[in-house]
Amino acid sequence: MSGERPDLAPYATRSTDSRGRKHPELFKDDRPHFERDRDRIIHSTAFRRLEYKTQVFVNHEGDYYRTRLTHTLEVAQISKGIARRLNLNEDLAESIALAHDLGHTPFGHTGEETLAFLMREWGGFEHNLQSLRIVEELEERYPDFLGLNLTWETREGLVKRSISQQGIPRTIPAEFSPEEAPSLEAQIIELADEIAYNNHDIDDGLEAGYLEEEELVAEVDLWMEMRDLVLRKHPAIEGKRLKYQTISHLIGYLIQDLVEHTRKMIKERGIETLQDVRRAGVNIVSFSPETRARNEVLKGFLQRKLYKHYKMERMRLKAKRVVQRLFEAYINQPTLLPLRHQRRTLQEPLQRVVCDYIAGMTDRFAIEEYKKLFDPEERV
Ligand code: MG
């Protein structure tokens, strides 16, 4: 493999040291491993479907808001920027970022919670593990194997990215050495995800009128500080431009803090090789304690004012009903499933087949399907 960047840090992940792919392949060119992974992810069906999956606002609520796809692109952009500044492998960070939400259901976390509940006696459902399932089994594109046959490192990043940040208990497949910390490139994704969604949710929330700018100024000191900074530079700025510039400064501030604090951690913990990263026992990629605390205030604000807004609750109720009723309909009468999915029940339990089918749906497809099955006026 050629094309490895010459300025990679000694603790970066190298394509040339990859633990490789599950299935041996004859390649048609000599792209480095992680670049090939990225290209395969972008060409996958699951990636295109992100366009019509909910981030926070259900897709048909309006064209302004982020979808899973535009959210994913923002996460990839932030991840690459951080990777570059830390001399880490941008291609690997980008691959994991582009694939990080592939396993999301329609209707965001509500869809996930509903499927997890319905699957509670059948092995459960969790979107990170579903991302892995998509790239290992569900995509059908290549002649000799199922899935995308991505490298071990990209797949590891998908299942391990958020373990210690959020303390979410999760079954990590033994193949990915659950006792070891993920690569620095994988560690970036969780925080790049957070930087992206905190900022775009403020933007979307203000646009929707669910959030008030005065409340942000009063309750979130990070917001007030960035806003003051913008106003000092551009005293006449107002309205949307002030909002966009404040968000831009906030993203810049968070990235800067993350990069500086991570450099400090690398030094303090004596990280010299990728092995050191894996054995460190803590996440090296991190915000400074001060910024983390200030960021928590922002997250708490969004939690109270946006995610728990009564209109959000209404969307959640509808979403839950759609997922639940579709699931029950297919389980009670599997002949409602398209033939391709009916055939899969020969190899897998019906519940898992139905779960995969629903998880793969976009919001609008799920709503159409709901109408087809339950609205007598609708064509089947
Ligand atoms: Mg995400």
Image: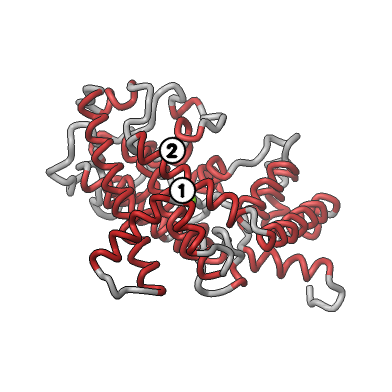
Q: What residue is rendered at 49% in x and 52% in y?
A: 219
Please give the residue where the numbered disc 2 appears in the rendered image: 161
Quarter assignment of residue 190 = top left
Q: What residue is rendered at 34% in x and 36% in y?
A: 286
Where's residue 158, x and y in %?
Answer: 45, 41
Quadrant into which the N terminus falls = top left
Question: Can residue 346 be seen at all in this image of the molecule?
Answer: yes
Where's residue 239, x and y in %?
Answer: 41, 74
Query: Label 1's element?
Result: loop
Tell me the amino acid under the disc marked 1.
His
Respond yes or no on whether mark 1 lies under 8 Å from ligand 1: yes
- How far, Cα to Cα, is label 2 from label 1? 9 Å
Tell me the amino acid under the disc marked 2.
Arg
Where's residue 339, x and y in %?
Answer: 71, 59
- Density class for disc 1 (Cα within 10 Å; few <14, some 14-19, many ≥20) is many
Query: Label 2's element?
Result: loop
* Circles 2 and 1 in contact, beta carbons < 8 Å: yes
User: In the image, which disc is placed on residue 286?
Assistant: none
Q: Nearer the viewer, residue 179 or 176?
A: 179
Q: What residue is rendered at 64% in x and 68% in y?
A: 364
Please give the residue where the numbered disc 1 appears in the rendered image: 100
Where's residue 352, x and y in %?
Answer: 69, 44
Q: Earlier in the sequence, mark 2 or mark 1?
A: 1
Q: What residue is rendered at 30% in x and 48% in y?
A: 255
Q: Residue furthest left?
A: 6
Horizontal relation, residue 77 to residue 338: left or right: left
Up-down relation of residue 165 to residue 361 (above or below): above
Q: Nearer the viewer, residue 25 or 6?
A: 6
Q: Nearer the viewer, residue 48 or 270?
A: 270
Quarter assignment of residue 261 = top left
Q: Nearer the viewer, residue 76 or 307?
A: 307
